[in-house]
Amino acid sequence: MLNKFEKKICCIGAGYVGGPTMSVIASNCPELRVDVVDINKERIDAWNSDDYSKLPVFEPGLENIVKKCRDINLFFSNKVEECISQADIIFISVNTPTKTNGLGAGFASDLKWIESSARQIAKYARNHTVVVEKSTLPVKTAETIKTILNSSLDINPSSEEKKTFSIVSNPEFLAEGTAINDLQNPDRVLIGGEDDYSINLISDIYKKWIDPEKIITTNLWSSELSKLVSNAFLAQRISSINSISALCEATGANIMEVVGAIGTDTRIGKKFLMPGPGFGGSCFKKDILNLVYLCRYYGLNEVADYWEQVVKINYWQQKRISALVIKNLFGTLSNKKLTIYGFAFKANTNDTRESPSINISKYLLQEGSKLNFYDPKVNQKQIFNELDVNEEDGNVLVYEDPYKAVEGADAVLILTEWNEFKFFNWEAIYKVMRKPSWIFDSRISLDQNHLKKIGFKVWTLGAK
Ligand code: UDX
Ligand code: ADP
């Protein structure tokens, strides 16, 4: 490797967090060499693709940054060991999904990828290395990482070369779809650590483009917990407003009018009050369940129940939307064809993790429906994977043309708020659908009156 750089960063994990975060660091810090490594060869090949539309993460603005920095001070490779051994700073950005079996299944995070990264760092790092937790992790994970790193020192105490480590927690607050802007102009950067040297080292990177007043330093545990609590508070707002959407439907109030009225109270604020089919994405559910697990561990059962309800309301919203689709289509979906517009968990991303579309589609399939899908950024392979179906199945078809996807359909469900849906030719869509033709707008994104004039029967979330 070249030595012209002041410092070398290695990021383990080239996913939705590692890829965009390291691209923005590389772009703002030309004096740093940033190596993003991953065990997944296909993913790395996609990051190195000459065709920039093939980057594995779709984020507005990302392509331009990768074009500017790749192979200059930003490198993507599978050379995990080599890059660890050369790095001054190592970011861990690997996946931490909820455990599916064993102790804490359904609540605790599976830390096996964190553990294996820590073991690789313990083995291959040299000299003093600052290890930064970037993945969302349960509180006290830094302790696990520290134990693994320090035990490597015991194994080889006589080694001539002295290895030392410090751990820093630097949680990521970027939201997908706006990741580049969030990284470029964050509300704050949180850095938790135990020694000034490492805290300052990481702060100095961010100070290259971020106002120092926005850089908050805390101890390790406060930083780890703040990430979980931030996400829990945000998700709680969504479950709160979604619970009220059901009450609006029952009583004749309009949820958007309620949102407008309460959001003007500056103590409540306008943001994050958009009702919908429930929150998705890789973080919210996982982080709340981690919080619930932590509270139960410490015997705080009432606190655990309180936060768990946020996740329960989220499932309930999806179930309730599915149930009312069935009810409006005469109580049965057998021999019916429904078109789902939108499979990503929100607009402007190709990520489908925990997307509300998954549960809603599964409920509808269980009722015997045939489903046609269209999403501008999600392909057939990903939809089949999430729904656990294959081409032979025949009940699930994925279209690249939204107008083909609605031919002969009884209903269209809007499950992701892609802007392009607003500009579709709804007259043309109406013509090719079976009558009566329904639109179920769970994202409150279409003009109900216009659709009704065309002839559609329309259900909009949170309105009678
Ligand atoms: C979230 C946090 O915002 C981010 O700080 C953290 O680092 C990771 O988790 P993300 O999951 O990418 O980011 O997206 P976000 O915009 O927060 O949306 C999460 C889900 O909530 C989406 O399914 C979205 O559709 C839904 N949502 C969001 C609503 O239903 N209503 C809202 O008002 C906002
Ligand atoms: P996130 O949204 O947290 O970024 P992703 O699943 O998108 O999660 O990305 C995590 C990445 O980490 C994956 O591409 C995975 O292959 C990679 N990864 C997991 N464990 C390791 C490891 N030990 N070494 C290198 N890469 C790893």
Image (cartoon, rainbow, N blue to C red):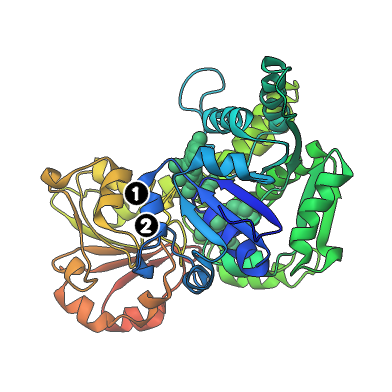
Who's the residue at 57% across and 70% down the image? Answer: 256
Measuring from the top left, give residue 279's x and y in whole percent. Answer: 52, 52
Q: Which mark is residue 461?
A: none
Q: Nearer the viewer, residue 169 or 451?
A: 169
Q: Is residue 37 visible?
A: yes
Q: Secondary structure at mark 2?
A: helix
192, above or below 33, in the image: above
Q: Is residue 458 above or below residue 75?
A: below
Give the residue type at disc 1.
Glu
Return the residue nearer the eye: 313 or 29: 29
Q: Which residue is mark 1?
A: 42
- Amino acid type, mark 2: Ala
Can the viewer see residue 282 in this picture? no
Q: Residue at x 56, y 39 (%)?
A: 286
Q: Is residue 261 left or right of residue 446?
A: right
| Residue located at (43% from left, 55% from top) | 351
Residue 46, numbered circle:
2
The answer to whether 61 appears left or right of 132 in the picture is left
Relative height, residue 101 to residue 234 (above, below): above
Q: SS at mark 1? A: helix
The image quadrant of residue 40 is top left
Task: Give x and y (percent) for residue 219.
Answer: 85, 40
> Quadrant location of ligand 1?
bottom right
